[in-house]
Image (tube, grey):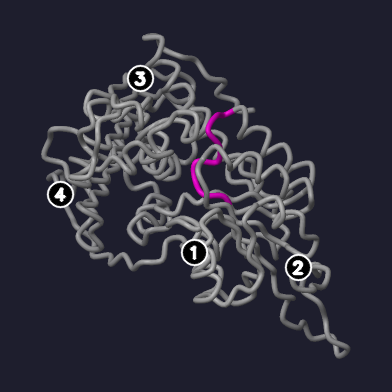
Amino acid sequence: MSTTTPAADPATTATAGGTASAPPELRVGVIGLGFAGSTHLDAFQSLDGARVVALAGQEPDRLQELGTSRGVDDLYADWEDLVARDDLDIVSIGVPNALHHPIAMAALESGKHVFCEKPVATTGDLAAEMVAAAVANDRVLEVAYNHRRRADVAYLASYLADDPIGEIYHARASWLRRSGIPGLGSWFTSRRTAGGGPLIDLGSHVLDIALHLMGEPRAVTVSAVAASALGRAGRGGGSKARAASDGTHEFDVEDFASALIRFDTGASLHLEAAWASYSKAHEDIEVELLGSTGGVRLHVDDYATDDTLTLYSDVAGAPTVSHPRVHVPAGHHRSVIDGFLRSIRAGEGAAAPRHVGHYGEYALHRSRIVDACYESAATGHEVELDGAGE
């Protein structure tokens, strides 16, 4: 490992003449070499005021390739060695879900801010431990719910701020695939390493969007069902898929889930997620809000970047439909990481409202809902949550 200097306080400093100078550069260590890790790496490198100085991962060739191509000199096989460095401000986590908790806990307890790929953890209890560690150490814990940073979602959030649809009484949120089980037989399809299937993978994204647009209501009850008919048979993962029953490819998660969630506001949400299903969907993302005086619909067909929004209202007593033109550029991870860096610099952790705090509380609420969905699906009964939160 190369010689390094202690991390500077990220607060803005002042020059002798009293003019504020540029804040010191935040030093970042990225853990993970796959899509998530490399996406985090590129996003941090593209932003002013942050520099990736260390990278960790278990694939030697990929580690060397990313280190060389991205200009990162300090490379580690083991994440523990990276987290042990005392010159890092931030640890970025882009590894299988089961590793989020141990890495984040080690980083937070050593005084580092944490950017974590979603889901925050495989269970709500583990997520709660991470939030508690962030609070105790006054470090920012942010989770990569990057789809809420889409330009069309931002447009809806701004539109809804003026209360054009009245009281929201019901919402629908879904992410459905025709055939798209990721890594059939890999860590994605193992409950031990992933925590679940499409509900925790895809469903958590549209759940996040819906809760964000609904004003962060607290869930009070959940009733859910789940199925895994296709994945267990080795279908739904593409031409290279092999049956899980051959003993070499584990599949003990769902490939479809559906839930009805009730909130403390009296509103409800129908949530659906599928990696594979014999249906028309190929890669459909949808969030729809029904209000007392109007409605809105986000429909993203196969990652579309245009024509994704529909607004429903009445004009002079006649039903009216409009389609705002909002282009969605790429770079959602870059946007959420930019906000993460701003939070660190502003020192907003302790001052932020609880439901949008920078200790990861909002991600914990989503994790509790997902837990309740899995419990309800397993037991066949409705599950109650504490609507007041942790």
For mark 3, does the 10 Å Cα neighbourhood hold few (<14), some (14 to 19), or many (20 or more) residues? many
Mark earlier in primary sequence (2, 1): 2
Where residue 304 sits, quadrant-wise, is: bottom left
Q: Position of residue 122 (x, y in %)?
A: 53, 33
> Circle 2: is it few (<14), some (14-19), or many (20+) Cα within 10 Å?
some
CA distance separating discs 1 and 4: 57 Å
Disc nearer the start of the sequence (3/4): 3
Earlier sequence position, callout 1 versus callout 3: 1
User: Residue beneath label 1, please?
Assistant: 61
Disc 3 marks which residue?
224
Q: How far apart are labels 3 and 4 at the CA level?
A: 34 Å
Disc assigned to residue 235: none
Secondary structure at numbered mark 2? loop
Q: Main secondary structure of the magenta part?
A: loop
Cα distance between the residues tagged 1 and 3: 43 Å
Q: Under tag 1, what secondary structure?
A: helix
Name the amino acid type tagged 2: Pro
Q: Residues within 10 Å of mark 4 (few under 14, many from 20)?
A: few
Instruction: Return the x and y of residue 284 as percentages of the image width and height.
Output: 22, 45
In this picture, which residue range is highlighted in magenta?
116-124
